[in-house]
Amino acid sequence: MSAAGLTYGPLGEHCAHLCVDMQRLFAEPSQWATPWITRVLPRIVSLVEWKAEQTIFTRFLPAQRPGAGVGTWKRYYQRWASMTIDNIGPEMTELLPQLSCFCPPAQVIDKHIYSPWPEGRLQALLAERRVDTLVVTGGETDVCVLATVLGAIDIGYRVVLVTDALCSSSDATHDALMTVYRQRFAQQVETVEMETVLSAWS
């Protein structure tokens, strides 16, 4: 039975809010700027304010220097040399200040690739907390959020994707991914707006 718009019922005590890469390097003027980030930030803040202890932020850490990395990541950081730590400074990897003020009790997991799963720290934390449901917000819908959601599906988490708390630098691929989530992953992914999450997570 659905609860407040959720196909598989209300959100319980084994739920966590996973907020993907809401960082300065995506909000401030740069080649990776995501214009929508300021639009979705207030909604994300509203959830973090209410569920700070259940919130986990991921941070994407670029390579230290141009051309660093393994395999295609080396080519990636040749292309995006301007976005390496040596060029942007480590402070640009920090969470947006509207969110970092909640840490602690919210926690931060760093990653060096799109997905937060291969490095193992996130999964260990979720297992320790006996989490079975992830409420996902952040950016970008079609890159790091995509990698996060697909990994969560493979592990077996129930995924609740908050549609009005996601951002991307591309309207077209954001819309395309929302169609994919709804049409191809309906057994594992529920797409709802923030109002539904706030009313359904006791």
Image: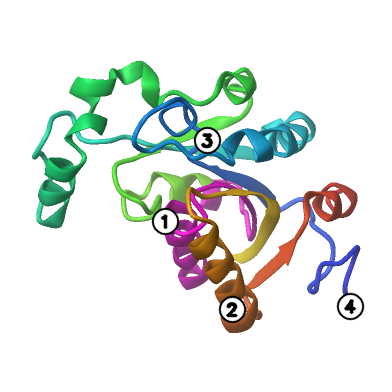
Question: Which numbered dot is residue 22?
Answer: 3
Residue type beneath disc 1: Val
Q: CA distance from mark 4 to mark 2?
A: 18 Å
- Residue beneath label 2, please? 185
Q: CA distance from mark 3 to mark 2?
A: 25 Å
Q: Nearer the viewer, residue 173 or 189?
A: 173
Q: Which quarter of the picture shows residue 85?
A: top left
- Residue beneath label 4, please? 1
Magenta-drawn stretch contains 131 = yes
Q: Is residue 1 left or right of residue 151?
A: right
Say whether disc 4 or disc 3 marks the residue closer to the N-terminus. 4
Dot in front, 4 or 3: 3
Q: Which residue is rendered at x = 11% and y = 47% of the image? A: 74
Q: Are marks 2 and 1 in contact (CB under 8 Å)?
A: no
Question: Secondary structure beneath disc 1?
Answer: loop
Magenta-drawn stretch contains 64 = no
Residue 171 placement (x, y as % from top left): 55, 57
Q: CA distance from mark 1 to mark 3?
A: 13 Å
Residue type beneath disc 4: Met
Question: Secondary structure beneath disc 4?
Answer: loop
Please rate how many residues cluster around mark 3, counting C-alpha atoms within 10 Å: few if below 14, some from 14 to 19, many from 20: many
Residue 129 placement (x, y as % from top left): 60, 46
Magenta residues span 126-155
Q: CA distance from mark 4 to mark 1?
A: 32 Å
Say whether disc 4 or disc 1 marks the residue closer to the N-terminus. 4
- Residue beneath label 1, please? 143
Q: Are marks 3 and 2 in contact (CB under 8 Å)?
A: no
Q: CA distance from mark 2 to mark 1?
A: 17 Å
Q: CA distance from mark 4 to mark 3?
A: 33 Å
